[in-house]
Image: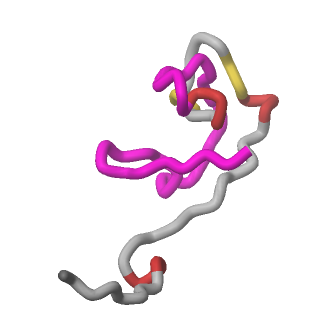
């Protein structure tokens, strides 16, 4: 049987908290797709963002999203 080991999460992955994207830049038709908490269960997004943002907020295929509302 294997032993359990305590690990610090930050030593193994990078964590980002949510970012307050300006809702004035939200759009229903054009821009970069914006994942909102309500979209996590549907696996689709209906909101686009037309503003500027740091590239660290771009979700990549291996990223894990955790929604807490």
- At which x and y percent is residue 48? 60, 24
Which residue is the extreme one toward the left? 1
Outermost residue toward the front in this view: 1
| Residue 3: quadrant of the picture | bottom left
* Quarter of the rendering occupied by the C terminus: top right
Relative to 48, say whether 67 is above or below.
below
Compared with residue 61, is residue 12 higher up or lower down, i.e. above or below? Answer: below
Judge whether residue 5 is colored magenta. no
Q: 23 or 40, which lies in front?
A: 40
- Residue 53 rendering spot, x and y as whole percentages: 60, 48
Lateral position of residue 24 relative to residue 42, left or right: right
Image quadrant assignment for residue 4: bottom left
Q: Residue at x 47, y 80 (%)?
A: 10
Q: Is residue 43 above or below residue 61?
A: above
* Left or right, residue 13 beside residue 53: left
Q: How is the image coloured?
A: secondary structure
**Residue 47 among those drawn in magenta:** yes
**Residue 56 horizontal side relative to residue 21, left or right:** left
What's the residue at 68%, 19% (across, down)?
A: 27
User: Which secondary structure type mostly characterizes the magenta part of the structure?
Assistant: loop
Measuring 73% from the left and 29% from the top, which residue is drawn there? 25
Q: Nearer the viewer, residue 6 or 9?
A: 6
How many marks on residues? 0
From the viewer's perspective, is residue 58 above or below residue 8?
above
Q: Quadrant of the N terminus?
A: bottom left
Q: Which residues are magenta?
A: 40-69
Task: Write the residue at 21% across / 83% down.
Answer: 2
């Amino acid at each position: 049987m294997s032993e359990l080991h305590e690990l610090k999460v930050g030593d193994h992955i990078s964590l980002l908290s949510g970012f307050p994207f300006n809702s004035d830049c939200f759009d229903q038709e054009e821009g970069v797709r914006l994942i909102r908490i309500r979209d996590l269960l549907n696996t689709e997004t209906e909101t686009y963002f037309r503003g500027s943002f740091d590239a660290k907020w771009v979700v990549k295929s291996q990223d894990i999203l955790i929604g807490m509302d």
